[in-house]
Amino acid sequence: MQRINENDLNRVKEEFFLRGETVARWAERNGFSSSAVYQVLSGRCQARRGDSHRIAVKLGLKREPSESKVSIHQHEEAAM
């Protein structure tokens, strides 16, 4: 399982600072609630699924799920 580490969180926060962009503005532009983005950036949320996962991927904190893993789940669902 991929974990988000403190260095990555600090890197993303620094990028916001260097761009002069607020977290709230980024959240609005990307269709997320600012509170959810702040939870991911603070490390309070593990970003395992749902919006928090999508936020982490969009911020570059997590990799996109690989196509092979998605197709494995699709085959499992089809077998049921």
Image (cartoon, rainbow, N blue to C red):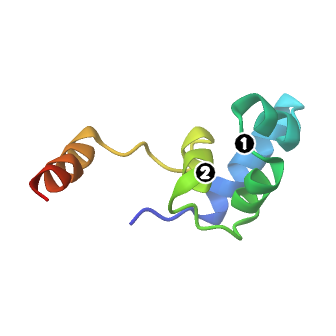
Between 73 and 62, the one nearer to me in the picture: 73
Between 68 and 21, the one nearer to me in the picture: 68
* Residue 34, horizontal then vertical, whole percent: 82, 48
* Residue 76, horizontal then vertical, whole percent: 16, 56
> Quarter holding the N terminus?
bottom left
Say what amino acid the circle numbered 2 marks: Asp
* Residue 68, horizontal then vertical, whole percent: 20, 43
Residue 32's disc is: 1
Circle 2 crowding by C-alpha within 10 Å: few under 14, some 14–19, many from 20: some
**For the view shown, which residue lies furthest in the front direction?**
80
Mark 2 = which residue?
Answer: 51
In the image, what residue occupies the spot 78% across and 47% down? 33
In the image, what residue occupies the spot 30% across and 43% down? 66
Q: Secondary structure at mark 1?
A: loop
Circle 1 crowding by C-alpha within 10 Å: few under 14, some 14–19, many from 20: some
In the image, what residue occupies the spot 72% across and 42% down? 32
* Residue 61, horizontal then vertical, whole percent: 57, 50
Which quadrant of the figure has residue 6? bottom right
Q: Secondary structure at mark 2?
A: helix
Mark 2 in CB contact with mark 1 (< 8 angstroms): yes
Q: Is residue 72 left or right of residue 46?
A: left
